[in-house]
Image: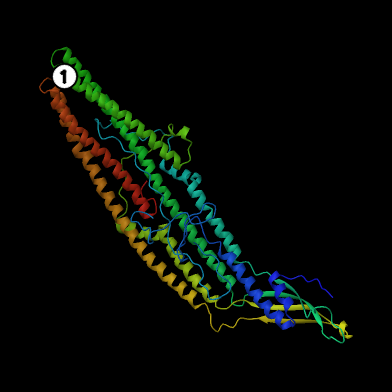
Amino acid sequence: MTHRVFFGSVLSAMTLCLGAQRADAQAMLADDIIILSKGQREQERARTNTHLGPSPGAGEAPFRVTPGAGEARLGEQPGGPGFTSTKQQRDVLSAASSDGRSISQVRPARIAPSARIQSQKIPIYGPLEVPDVSDEGPPDGLTLDTAIGRLAQVNYGLRTKFQEIPKAQADILSAGLRGNPLVFASADGVPYGSYSPRRPGENGYSVVLIQPIDVNRKRLVRVHVAEQAKKVLEAQYQDAVRLEIDNLYTAFVDVLDARETVRFARASLAGLNRVLKTTEEQYRKELVPQTEVESAAIQRDTAEVFLEQAETALRQAKRALAVLLDIPPAQADSLEVRGSLRDDLAPPPPPEELAKLALCVRPDIVSYRLGIRRAQADVTLQRAERFPDVFVLYTPYGFRNNAPVDEKSATSWSVGALVSIPLFNRNQGNIRRAEHTVIQTQIELTSLERQALSEVERASLDYASTRSAAERLERGILPRARRLRDQKYTLYTQGQENIVSYLNAQRDYNEVVRQYRDALIRHRRSMLRLNTAVGQRVLP
């Protein structure tokens, strides 16, 4: 007699067909249950890589980015191998069974900054002049606040990284799923040939329902770990926004820098046109030789070249800003910004207050504080993993075929449980590893806090220094240099000095104007750098 048997898996079928007793089949069934359980957890464990890189408190080293594979995108963070002094995976699910193998974890690290945009360099030659009035740009121009709002909405890098947050929410859902029941059909005592009174024997058929029972609440702990991982990712995303805004600061000030240089160059060209006109009038009156006309013309032509270079640099700066804000290249040249390089505001709070504020609000520091909680939650999970699930086996129907021996067949039911006795492996290694991840994350948090305090201190010193330099140049050095230049010009127009004397005074004045312009640029950058160091806009 042959029988058609359907098994839950090919391996189980091949194994059980060789057995002759129900006890053997159930023992092999237990092995299959464990294998299936581990396979499900391995699939869960595979979904750990993120576009936001490794999460603080996760404890595992990230792999390189593989396009389309969902791996880390933000690189190493301060405190890790890529630790820098200027800027700066979450394993949501863990294995359900404690089989003694080390659980994959990710080493805590934080978001690496995007590459800083290179400032547009203006040629150092040619005369300059301070415009008579300041110009913040057209009233409908792009302000820094508007640019920041647009950056958060349209920047492709931020939009990509934001998708990690709903993915983390999906991991919370996965972590809270209960184990599905298993159905196992078996046949035992199946003879080669057939049984008879002269060759007695019996065969049986049964259907077994298997339900894993989470006796020590591992599922709830996994949900808690996934929730903590999501909070870390949210803080990491906020830090990614902070760093991208710092890039925007650089690009925005580059445009202001280039625009101010164009204004200085135009004012200088207008002044040199007046000098050339005066020199030509003096030459017609035979008061100066032809060589002085040529000298004045050379200076005027040099100013024209300088203006052309400054206008080109302005176009380049606008295009760099347009890339960050997803503005089409065709519209980049018409992009106008509204802002000033001059600082007419009250100074920020003292460095001590700014340092306290940075420790409270900087998202990279917040992510590490949350990372400690995430690591502590993982310790709780690893302790819960000491005891695997209990598997309850219920056989609602069992059939014993006694017809070959002329006896009445019988049906039955049975119930059983599969419990692991934790004599040897109680997940001690993974527990110790998780505990040291907590310590490691705490050490990195301390290092990051000190780094943040250093950044705030340096940014505050830079702000005070550049503000003092700009004020001294504007109120003292620049007016004196202008008076000296004007006096030489008056003496030149009266014929008391030659053009060489005036041009020397103009050259000295040009150098002071350059220093003043550079001081304004440095100070404006220091204002925005202080915002980045604190993690909050304390200056506009």
Q: Is residue 380 above or below residue 270?
A: below
125 left or right of 329 in image: left
Q: Where on the picture, by quarter, is residue 312?
A: top left
At horizontal 84% and vertical 75% (from top left) the residue drawn is 1
Please name whichever residue, 431 or 173, is drawn nearer the observer in this view of the structure. Answer: 431
- Rate crowding at label 1 as few (under 14), some (14 to 19) or many (20 or more) other CA atoms within 10 Å: few
x, y percentage for residue 478?
20, 36
Q: Is residue 342 above or below residue 293?
A: below
Please name whichever residue, 28 or 34, is drawn nearer the observer in this view of the structure. Answer: 28
Q: Is residue 337 visible?
A: no
> Hey, which residue is sitting farthest right in the picture?
406
380 left or right of 193 in image: left
x, y percentage for residue 441?
41, 67
The residue wearing badge 1 is 291
Dot 1: what SS? helix
Q: Is residue 196 above or below residue 504?
A: below
At horizontal 33% and vertical 47% (from top left) the residue drawn is 527
357 left or right of 376 in image: left
- Circle 1: residue type: Thr
x, y percentage for residue 321?
42, 40
Please name whichever residue, 164 or 252, is drawn nearer the observer in this view of the structure. Answer: 164
At horizontal 32% and vertical 59% (from top left) the residue drawn is 453
> Hey, which residue is sitting farthest left in the picture?
496
**How many numbered marks are there?**
1
Please name whichever residue, 162 or 424, is drawn nearer the observer in this view of the structure. Answer: 424
Q: Where on the picture, by quarter, is residue 17?
A: bottom right
Q: How is the image coloured?
A: rainbow
x, y percentage for residue 492?
14, 22
Q: Is residue 64 visible?
A: yes
At horizontal 39% and vertical 48% (from top left) the residue drawn is 115
Q: Is residue 200 above or below residue 515?
A: below
